[in-house]
Every structure is written in structure tokens, then in C-alpha cells.
Amino acid sequence: MVLAQESAATGIGIYLPLVLLFALALAFAVFSVLLGPLVGPQRYNKAKQAAYECGIEPSPQPLVGAGRMPVAYYVTAMLFILFDIEMVFLFPYAVSADALGLWGVGAVTLFIATFFIADFYVWRRGGLDWN
Amino acid sequence: MTNVFLAQADIEAPPIDYAAILPMLIILGAACVGVLFEAFLPKHQRWPGQVTLSLLALAGAGVALGAYAGDSPERGVTTLSGTLAVDRPALFLWGTLLALALAALLLIADRSVEPGGAFVAQAGIAPGTVQDREQVGSTGMQTEVFPLTLFALGGMMAFTAANDLLTMFIALEVLSLPLYLMCGLARRRRLISQEAAVKYFLLGAFASAFFLYGLALLYGYAGSVRLADIANATAGTDRSDTLLFAGLGLLLVGLLFKGSVGPFHTWTPDVYQGAPTPITAFMAACTKVAAFGAILRVLTVAFETTNWEWRGVLWAVAIVSMLIGAVLGLTQTDVKRMIAYSSIAHAGFLLIGTMALTDEGLSGTMFYLLAYGFTTLAAFGVISLVRDSTGEATHLSAWAGLAKRSPLLAGVFTFLLLALAGIPLTSGFVGKFVVFSAALSDGMAPLVVIALVFSAVAAFFYLRVVVLMYFSEPAPEGPSVSVPGAFTTAAITLGVVVTLLLGVAPTFALDWAGAGGFALGS
Amino acid sequence: MIASSWLLVAFPALGALILLLGGNRTNAWGHLLGCATVIASFVYGLAMFFADSFAEAADTTVYSWIPVGALQVDFGLRIDPLSVTFVLLITGVGSLIHIYSIGYMAEDRDRRRFFAYLNLFVASMLVLVLGNSFVTLYLGWEGVGLASYLLIGWYTDRPSAATAAKKAFLMNRVGDVGLALAIFLMFKHIGSTSYAEVFAGIGDVSPGVVTAIGLLLLLGACGKSGQFPLQAWLPDAMEGPTPVSALIHAATMVTAGVYLVARSAPIYNLTEDGRLLVTIVGAFTLLLGSIIGCAYDDIKKVLAYSTVSQIGYMMLAVGLGPFGYALGIAHLLTHGFFKAGLFLGAGSVMHAMNDEVDMRKFGGLYRKMPITFATFGLGYLAIIGFPFLSGFYTKDAIIEAAFGQEGWRGWIFGGSALLAAGITGFYMTRLVLLTFFGKQRWRETTSADGREFHPHESPPVMTVPMIVLAVGSVAAGALLISGDTLAEFLVPAVGELSESDHGVLPHALIPWLTVLISALGVLLAWTLFGRRDTPVERPANVSWPVRAARKDLYGNALNEALVATPGLWLTRFSVFADNRGVDGAVNGLAAGLGGGSGRLRRLQTGFVRSYALSMLGGGVLLVGALLAVRYS
């Protein structure tokens, strides 16, 4: 707290932790990307050359050959985003749950219920079935 | 500054005026229930369930709106921490949106003109594949279109009532995303439909980026996204006007895109043509209302004091839009594209009223939106009836001699075209009249002259269709005119009756539109 | 009677509504209903004429049409001498034309729909003349344009009819823009569009604006009345059935322009320049019309250009100012009688001749069609100004008034009016000689569809209206002019008729001069066409004035140069700019410059990237312009 107050006096200093975090993240990403080719075994196959290396094969395209991803893939992707968004909103709630009191519980319950509507839809429409 | 890292002690929940926002809540709530219907109802019950739900929601929202509007405060209220302003213009636009959405929903729900409805059974199947050929015969449809329509409608309602730019942006996305999807759902001509969806999506995202960038610059300028705060900030002199005007410009690009105002119209013809016709009708009517409702609010509430700086530029935009719409409309051979160019020209006319920033300008523009919405919606309803073996026959050559085959349909379409051209005793004339006279009394005489000339030019391409229907020999293998089901008949009748009523006795609608201005406080 | 004057409009409007909505169920009696509604209006108008006095204009408000803030537009009617005069002309001549149409259209399957359109036409025209504000007038104005469009394009199997209908509508739209602008100007400077308030407030408006309003109104009048430079649609409008031509030329539509100028008398009284331009347009058009009328072999087109010329006389008269309004209206009334009679006569001839319009194929018809000949002959004598027939009185009065102007104006306007009187004598005599006298050329030839001609007199349902109109052609002039009957009646609406006494020629001389010049024209025509045979084939090798006249004195070329070509180039440029700006592709260049309709279709490239680019360009321009405005 003391640190924050002192930095605030010097103006832009409060952003220093952010900059450090950014540098750290960048360094980690560069490190990981470089490390793989250096130390890992070099055995290529077709799947590894694909655009998204996650087991989903692009559908063959007769005309262009650019390789589209099948629609089923996007259902999974969207499901991921759904939970992502839920998380984004639940974190700040969790931090100030006490201050928000009973009203906050009600609001966040409503939010989760709304979220589950979409969840139900994906579930009933087979978005969770693999194949 | 210490609070940056600390949770605040007691957080007050903002007061919410539930009565004011009830219509919107009903629509969005019904949309959520619609999604649940999709999840849990068996296939054959979905269509009746969704139609009933959607109609009930529209009726309920209408009743709630009517009940609230009856004794709403003169200057309106702002609620939800000042993010929504429910004032008289917002109420009028909500009413317009609900009424137009009702007519559009009737077109969407129709399953007799095209067996099984205008929507494909499985939109996710790639065109040209084996599965695609298999589903040609099926009469199922994606009933998701109903909740999507309601979500879009809810977004539009929020869009016209948004009192700060961030809410406006969220509303913009809520209204846009369902529309992108709905464009790709056409049962026939899958490829062009999907192309329309992708184009609309990509360009829409592009426009959203403009809007967002403008928002950021304006926040930088005013230190707030609240419209009223931006207006207060413009009164001060020590801030950078570069931020202000660059922000306004980028914001306007995003808004003008939605209103399909030239030169940001490029998506309009392709998307209008490719989308399923009921969706085109919904877009042409409701999106226009929402977009111009938002433009009206932004310009009036936030930028009134700076209007001498931006007005000249919007003059140019209006002229370009009218020019593109009226002149390029002349060379169209597809009737849906032609109406698309007509909508671009009308966007130019609307912009003229929007710029007036007077009470007359506000009420005139809103009246114009109401009038134009119903006319164009009914026109698309008629277009959906002219069909041949491959679906709708939208090429103009197919419309030759239509009056001989179906005099009633040709007569109705002629009436609607005359309304679009602004002939007296139709709503189009009254709309143009009130908008142009508002512009004139606000010192925009040269612009009115130009607009009159362009409306005369635009009359030519409406006339071309009339000539074609009445004075040409029908093609031997021409299209047939489907007997419309109850839903489509109701929608077209509604559109025609409103067009006539607003032309003959516009008093009541003008009174509603002129009932009060925007809520200026926060 | 005045309070319920909306019935005048309601009768024909209701007729049109019933006939259009009733569909084929009303086929059996539709034509009778169509006639009955117009006759009802006529009777009502007549009753009103005798029962009420019109010393003051009576405004009645039917209902409030467009009320927004400061702008109040009521749907109201104004009953005054001017509007009542027009009501009687429209419904009176209109009734006769309706009755005539029963016979003329007897063989048309869609006769009921035809009557619905006729009723719509009459109702619109009544709204036009009865409205008590310029906006109501505009309503009727557009309605007349629409109805004429439907009727001119009646013969849907003829492509030329569709073209003519389109041309009429579009050239009218050009005029409409002028009228609309004038209305908006009035609203801006006076704050109202009703006659009462506009005329009361026009005095406080700056002279420049008054002149602008006057000129814009004139543009509207030119479009509707077929005056230079917007005259080209009127002859093409002959593509419609002949009763329609009669209705357009005698009772409705073309008279609207004259009405507009006369109605706007308080405005024109204030603007010398505006009036002068009206006069110039009138004088020019009356010469133009009469010259072209000499060149055509199509009986209806000759009559059409004759109308152009006669309306020119009326415009000339109303342009002369306070002492011309009544003269213009008087000529309008007599012209209504004789031109309707001439058109119905021409229709009767065509009816007898398998719808043939080429006068070179007629000849010697007076034996076969005595009634038509007699009525047509009376109309002919009236139009050339034969002494003591109606045209003599009214046309002569206009020529006299034109010579009554000071200095060069008197010579120019009077001279051209006098010259045109001679030319009128020439082309009308040519028409009558070619049609009714000489060798029976139709015996040697066949109609376009290969049938032989068997001319016969028309049924009574057609001849009776012609006889009534002929009687009117003979008597109307004397009734209206002698003792200044009409002029005094019109005083409350257009002001006192004042004589001018500084004319360039003595008054007493002018009538005799007119008769002399007309007689010369008749004589010349007789020498050329009466004394020798006319070839059935049209001579191709003719002198340049005839060639020019045959090409409508290049009226179409003028319209093309003024309106059509710039429009075409604008379209091409926009398409070009759209393609260029969007993609810069070569095909865009080709479409822009080539301009073929097939290539024009490629308006948009269809590439999302190009669309996005144009949006970006637009955005950059928008932001740049905003900043430029701010920092300039």
C-alpha cells in the first residue's frame, strides 16, 4: 500500500507493475517458442503441419483447397468462450462479494442462470458430444 | 488513489426504474425463453411454440409500453445508473420498433408461401455437399430465428435508449450479431445467403471497430462516455478538439454504417439481396429505425453545441448517399437490390432531418422512420410472393407484365412504390414534407433543393418497375404469384394500411412523434 | 352549398374507388357509374353557381392534414369565381367526354377500369383547382400526373404507349420539382402554404424571393401545360385513347398550368420579371406549337401541337398581368369547348377508319360522316377565329392585349400572336382539307393491319356530345366576352380587368387584322392542299424548315441535351466512380466509359475487401473533413 501511494505521487509510476508483468509474459512466450525446437525431438507429421494443431482435421475443399474448419469445431470454441465470459464476470464478483451482500448474490445467481440458458442449448443440441 | 487496490466498503445497488424498461426486459426475457424452447421442446412443437412466444412477447411489450407511455414524465427518466434514457423519443422509437417487428415476425413465421418457411433446416451444412442436397426436400426450418429476432429487437431498443456510448456499443453488438446469423439462413440460394452473412459480419465488425475507436477518443476527450458529459465537455475550451472531432467522425462511421448511409452503404445491396426476404424486411425497417434513433440521440444530446463544425460534413454525406441511392438504383436489375439502393437514398433524406436538431427535425425524422419502415416492410412482403421454380423471382425481367397475372399484387406494389417515391396521400409524401420543411426552417435550403431533385430522380426507378408490371408483355415462362398465407397477408395488409393512414391522416402519429425531446440530464 | 363543396371531389373519387375495388363485378354498369359521378359533380357545381354568390373567396377546412409545430397544412377547399369556373369546365366537358367514351371504348375489355381512371383524373383535377393551399394543389397536381400516366399508357400492347406515358410522367416530375421548391420557399418565408396567408404575406417578402417563387411556379406550370422547354411530352401523350387526349387537352391537365399562374396572381403582380418570363414562354410556345403543327400528318399530333400553341396564348395572356388573367381564362374556356370537340371529332374519324391517324389516308370523308364533319367544322371555324364564333372573341382579345403592351413588347408579343393566328389558319385548314375533302384516298389503301377502310358515322352516344360541344364552340365566346361577363365574374379572384391605352396599334384595327391574317393562312392552305391531290406517301425530299418542324423543332433533342444526357453521364460517372473508388479494376473503367446496360449492372465488385476499403476511405474523408472544418 505504501508503495502504491509513493508511486502515485510520481505519476506514471503506478503502471510499473503492469509493464513488468507485460515484459514477463513476453519473455515467457518467447522462451517457450524457442525452447521447443531446441530441445524437443523433431518428428513431423501431417497433423503437426495443420493450421490448428489440436486434432481437428480441416475439411478438404474441392475448389480452393485452403482448408476450412468443420462447423463442429466452432461449437466447442464457443462453449469455451461461454465459460470464459462467465469467469470474467465471476472474478470481480468474488473479490467484492462481501461488500455486495445479499443483493449481489441475487444478481450473480440471475447471471449464472442466464448463462445456463446458453449452456442448456449447446448441451441439448449435441454440442458436448464428441464426433 | 488508494482505492485502486482496495475493495470498497459498501456498494449501493443502482436504482432501477423497472416500469420504464419493462418492454425491453420482456423482449430480452422472451428471447432467453425462446432459447430454452429450442433446447427442450421436441422438433415439431418448436415452430408453434416459438411463434406463440414471440407474438405474446411483442404484445406484452406493447402493452407495457402503452401503460408506461400514458403517464411517462415529460422530460423522460434515466435509469440503470444513467445508462439508459427512457424519454419520449425513445418511447416513440420503441413503439415503432415493436410494431415493425410484429409485421416482420409475421413474414418470418409464414410457412405457406415457401413450404416450410423461408429458412433452411440446417444452416451449418456447407452448400453443394451431399447433406445439402439431402435437406433440399425437407420442410424443417431453423426455429432459432425467432429468439434471434427477439435478441436483435432487444438490442435495437437498447440502442435507441442508450444514454452513454458504452451501452450504445453493447446494444450495437446485441442487435448486430443475431442479424449476421439470420442473413445466412435462407432456404434457397444457400451460397449467396451465406456470402451475405459473411460480408455483413466482416464489414459490421469493421464498422464496430470504427465505433469503438471513436468511443475511446471521445472518452479521452471528455473523460466520460456519458452523452451529457461529452456535451458539457464541449462547452469547455481547454481540451483538444482533435480528439473530439476525430472521435465524432469515427463514431459516426459506425452509426452511418448501420443506417446504410452512403458511402458506408457498400454492404447493403449484397446483404439485402442474399438474406432471406423476411429478414431483409426486418433489417430494412427495424435496423434503420434503430440506427437513426441512435444518430438522432448522439447528435442532439452530445454534439448540439458543436453542430456548426460537423453539419457541413454531414451535408456532404447526405448528398453522397442520395446520389448513390438514386443514381445507382437506376441501373439495378434485381428488385431486392433496387429496394436496397432506395433505402440508401432514403437514408440520405433521413439524415437531412436528423441534422436539423430542432423539435420539428426530431419529430419529422421519427415520423419518416415509422412511415418508411412500414412501406419498405410491406414491399419486401410482396417481393416474397413472386416466385418461380427456384424460389423468389427477384430479377426485374421476371416481373414483366405481372399486372396481367395478378392485378391485386401489382396494385399493392405500385402503391408502395408510389409511397417510396413520395406521392401525396401516401405516408412517403407526408414524411418527406415534414422532414424537408424542418430542414428548411433550420437553414438548409440548398440541401432541400438537392434532396427534391434526387427524389425526382429516384421516382424514375420506382416508375420503371411500375412500367414493367403494367406495360410489358409477361414472359412466357414467368413466375407465378403465390397465394399468401394468413401471416404474410396480415403483414402486407398492415404495411399498406399504415402507409395509407399515415398519408391521409398523419395527425396522431405526428403528435406522438412531437410529444417531447430527449432527456438531456444524466 | 359551399359548405358541402367537398362533394364535388367526393363523387368522382368514390366512383374511382368503387370501380377499382369492385373489380369485374362492376363491369356491367361500371361505365354508367363513371358517367353518373361526373355528371353529379357537374350538376352540383351548376347548382352552386346559381345558388351562391362568390363575391368573396370561401375557404372551408375539411380536416387538418399535416400539423407539426409551426407548420399547419389543412385539407381545405376554396370556392371562388376562379375555382367555380374551372369546376364547371372540368365537370361539364368531362361529362361529355365520359359519355362519348361509352361508345368509343365499347369494344375494350377493360372499359370499367378505363372509367375508373377517368374518374380518378377528374377527381384529381378537382382537388387541384379547389384546394385552398399550395400543398393541396400539389396533391391534385401529382394525382393528375399519375392518372394521366395510367391513361396515356392505356394500350399496354404498344411499346410506344409505355414510352409516352413514362415521358409524360418524368417531364411532369421536372415541373413538379419546381412547384415543390416554390412551396417550400413560401413556407420558409411566409410560414404557411395556404392561399389566404401566402397572398397576405407575399408583400413583405423580398423581391428576389418573390421572383424566385414566380419562376419556380412557372417551371411547374410549363411541365403540366406542355410549355417550352417541357412541351415534348404532350404530343407523345396522343398514344392514349382519344377521349383521354380530349380530357387532357381540353378539361384537365394542361389547363392546370394556366390555373396555377392565374391563381398565383397576387404573387405575379409583384414580380415584373416573373410575368415577363411567363409572357415570353407563352409567346415562344405559341409560335413553336403552330409551326410544328403544320408538319405532321398524324391528325392527333396536329391537334396536340395546336393545343401547345393555344395554351401558349393563354400563358401569354396571364403573363400580361392584371388585365390578362380574365382573357387567359376566357380563352381557356372556349378552347375547352372547341378543342374537346375537335378531339372527339378526330376520335370519331379514327373510330370509322380502323384507328388510322395518318391524314394522307383520309380524304373526302364529309359524305360518309356528315355529323362529325359538321361538328368538326364548327370547332375548326372557332379555332381559326372565324368572326363571331368563340375563338374569334377570346383569341382576338389576347392579341389585342398583347399589342397593348408598351414599346418593343407590344410589337414582339402582339406580332407573334398575330403571326401564329395566321399559321393556325394554315394548319387547321390543311387538316380539314386532307380529312374531309378531296379525293377519297382511303379507297386505294389499307390500314396498318391490312384491313380495308369502311368509314361510317359514329353512334349517337358519340355524336351527341360532339354536337353539344360544337354548340358551345359557337356560342361560348360571345357569352363570355360580350359585356365582360366573365371578367367581372372573376374580379374577386384575379382582380380588375384594366385596359391598356398605350398600345402600339389602334384597338379598332386589330380584329380585322387578325381576321385578315387568318384568312391568308386559310387561303394558302387551300392553294396547296385544296386545289391539288395529296400523295398518300409522305414526301421525303422537303426543305429544311419542314424537316425541322417534322422533328418537333428539335424539342426532343433539347430535352435530351438538357435533362437526359446529363442524367446519363451522372449515372455513368457514379458507376464509374463506384467501381474505380472501390476496386480500381479495369472492368470498372470499361463499365464507366462504355456505358452499355449489361456492363452497368456490375455496380459493385462483390469483394468484401473492396467494400471495406471504400468504408475506410469514407471514414478517413469524414474524419479529415471534420478536422479540416474545425481547423480551417
Image (tube, coloured by chain):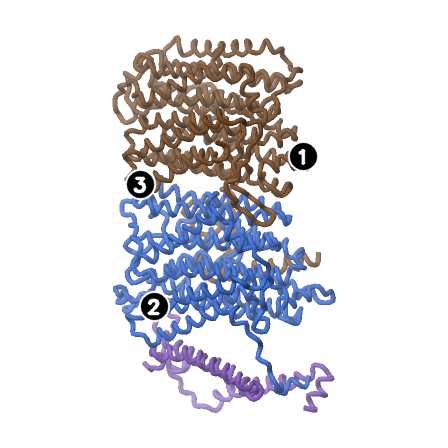
SS for callout 3: helix
Q: Is residue C309 visible?
A: no
The kind of residue on which mark 2 rests is Gln
Q: Is residue C74 above or below residue C152?
A: below
For mark 3, does the 10 Å Cα neighbourhood hold few (<14), some (14 to 19), or many (20 or more) residues? Answer: some
Left or right: B290 in relation to C159: right
Residue drawn at point x = 53 percent, y = 16 percent: C481
Which colour denotes chain B?
Answer: blue
The kind of residue on which mark 1 rests is Gly
- Give the residue at mark 1: C203
Query: Which chain is home to disc 1?
Result: C
The kind of residue on which mark 3 rests is Gly
Which one of the lettered chains is coloured purple?
A
For mark 2, does the 10 Å Cα neighbourhood hold few (<14), some (14 to 19), or many (20 or more) residues? Answer: many
Residue C573 versus residue B189: which sits nearer the camera? B189
Task: Give x and y (percent) for residue B277.
Answer: 38, 58
Can you tell which mark lies on residue B142? 2
Residue C593 versus residue C202: which sits nearer the camera? C202
Give the distance between the C-alpha atoms of the residues marked 2 and 3, in whole angstroms: 41 Å
In front: mark 2 or mark 3? 3
Q: Is residue B413 above or below residue C558?
A: below
Which one of the lettered chains is coloured brown?
C
Q: Are marks 3 and 1 in contact (CB under 8 Å)?
A: no
Q: Are marks 2 and 3 in contact (CB under 8 Å)?
A: no
Dot 3 and dot 1 within a common chain: yes
Residue drawn at point x = 37 percent, y = 60 percent: B106
Can you tell which mark lies on residue C23? 3
Task: Give x and y (percent) for residue B72.
Answer: 55, 64
